[in-house]
């Protein structure tokens, strides 16, 4: 009897190791929403394929697209627009909240593009990360809408709240200095420190320079993020096994004590736990005209989407993931 039980356990565990509970969700939605090749990009990616300098027409178009995207979701996401002026430029941070504001996970990327060189698109910096944020938002929205009744009421058992943040003005207009860079994140962190919003932020995750063709390593930059980094390591291992991939973005042997100046900095210096998902060294296309859509990579983009969806599920279920690997999953998503 004990032996049979043991065998069952083994079988169950094995099922867990090689299966993602939402695999068919990923397979059916990624192909549509996040596809990309040399000449075509899917509906969540293509709107960012333009210059997005703060205050410009391209920036406004992207804002409208992102706002419409959240309006189209099932849940009633709260919208916060932070408009401000600095250095003669107009900036707009876009923040979308779901659930509680008293304890929440923050997921962020910057949607502005660099003023120079002229025509700079910023495919990995950060068009693709912004599209990934939208994909994650749809995922959260669908899981909360459908999953609670369809799959398992405990799947998001510890879901409290989430804020999806699109920062403006990450890039410097001239030389990168402490006053010419990080306009949006400096503004948001200062405002939220004053009104108490920052105290309720449990973890700040920043996606940057992701989705390109070059293979990358993302080290763990902070002690406070160790446990979360470990989760990413494990999820990637499962992903690689299951999808037949071999590149290792996360590596426990790589320990990095450098700090890269980016949108996590105004939060990190105020004591927020930050998980900075940026490769080091930077991809060679960084801040050149080569950082365009022709140099984005579908496989990498899809991998990041899946890893981050699994990360989010695990974040809200630290003790019991993966859950019910063989249950049905949601087939549809509205967009
Ligand atoms: C990106 O935009 C450029 C310019 O409009 C276009 O030529 C190119 O096909 C687009 N690339 C993708 C992958 O969508
Ligand atoms: C790119 O994808 C589009 C849409 O799926 C397809 O019509 C087109 O043939 C593809 N182009 C290449 C070069 O693979
Ligand atoms: C959370 O904060 C946002 C932005 O300030 C606000 O619009 C929203 O109503 C708040 N949500 C709850 C549940 O209080
Ligand atoms: C980050 O986390 C990894 C694995 O959890 C650990 O090996 C590494 O030492 C950590 N890095 C820092 C800077 O704390
Ligand atoms: Zn940049």
Image: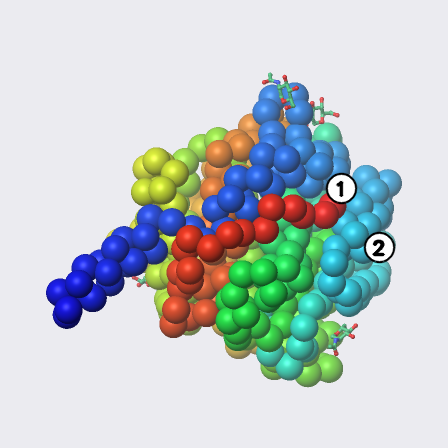
Point 46% across, 55% down: residue: 327
Of callouts 2 and 1, the N-terminal one: 1
Asked whether, in this view, residue 20 is left or right of residue 128, the answer is: left
Q: Is residue 14 above or below residue 228?
A: above
Choose between 143 and 279: the one closer to the eye.
Answer: 143
Q: Residue 235 in the image: x percent, y percent? A: 38, 53
Choose between 319 and 236: the one closer to the eye.
Answer: 319
Point 50% across, 62% down: residue: 313
Q: Which residue is mark 1?
A: 52
Q: Quadrant of ligand 2?
A: top right
Residue that sits furthest to the front in the current view: 1
**Dot label at residue 97:** none
Q: Residue 62 in the image: x percent, y percent? A: 78, 44
Q: Residue 27 in the image: x percent, y percent? A: 53, 40
Q: Can you tell me whether the CB of the residue at mark 1 lies under 8 Å from the nearest atom of ligand 5? A: no
For residue 269, say whether it is visible. Answer: no
Asked whether, in this view, residue 303 is left or right of residue 242, the answer is: right
Q: Quadrant of the N terminus?
A: bottom left
Asked whether, in this view, residue 268 is left or right of residue 98, the answer is: left
Categorize mark 2 by other alpha carbons within 10 Å: few (<14), some (14-19), many (20+). Answer: some
**Dot label at residue 90:** 2
Q: Residue 265: which quarter of the image? A: bottom right
The kind of secondary structure element at disc 1 is loop
Observer-side mark, 2 or 1, equals 1
Q: Are marks 2 and 1 in contact (CB under 8 Å)?
A: no
């Amino acid at each position: 009897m004990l032996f049979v039980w043991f065998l069952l356990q083994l079988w169950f565990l094995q099922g867990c190791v090689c299966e993602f509970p939402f695999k068919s969700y990923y397979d059916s939605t990624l192909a549509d929403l996040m596809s990309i090749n040399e000449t075509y990009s899917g509906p969540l990616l293509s709107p960012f394929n333009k210059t997005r300098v703060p205050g410009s027409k391209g920036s406004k178009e992207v804002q409208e697209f992102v706002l419409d995207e959240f309006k189209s979701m099932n849940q009633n996401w709260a919208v916060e627009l932070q408009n401000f002026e600095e250095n003669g430029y107009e900036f707009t941070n876009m923040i979308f909240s779901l659930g509680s504001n008293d304890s929440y996970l923050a997921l962020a990327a910057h949607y502005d593009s660099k003023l120079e060189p002229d025509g700079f698109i910023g495919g990995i910096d950060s068009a693709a990360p912004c599209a990934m944020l939208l994909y994650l938002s749809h995922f959260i929205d669908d899981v909360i809408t459908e999953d609670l009744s369809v799959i398992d009421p405990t799947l998001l058992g510890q879901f409290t709240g989430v804020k999806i943040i699109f920062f403006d003005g990450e890039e410097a207009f001239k030389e990168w200095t402490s006053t010419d860079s990080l306009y949006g994140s400096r503004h948001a962190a200062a405002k939220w420190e004053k009104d108490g919003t920052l105290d309720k932020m449990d973890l700040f995750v920043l996606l940057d320079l992701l989705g390109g063709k070059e293979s990358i390593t993302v080290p763990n930059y902070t002690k406070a993020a160790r446990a979360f980094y470990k989760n990413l390591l494990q999820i990637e291992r499962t992903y690689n096994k299951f999808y037949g991939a071999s590149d290792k973005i996360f590596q426990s042997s790589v320990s990095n004590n450098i700090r890269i100046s980016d949108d996590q900095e105004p939060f990190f210096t105020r004591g927020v736990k930050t998980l900075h998902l940026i490769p080091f060294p930077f991809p060679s296309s960084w801040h050149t005209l080569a950082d365009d859509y022709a140099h984005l990579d579908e496989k990498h983009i899809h991998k990041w989407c899946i890893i981050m969806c699994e990360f989010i599920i695990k974040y809200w279920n630290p003790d019991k993931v993966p859950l019910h690997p063989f249950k049905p999953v949601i087939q549809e998503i509205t967009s």
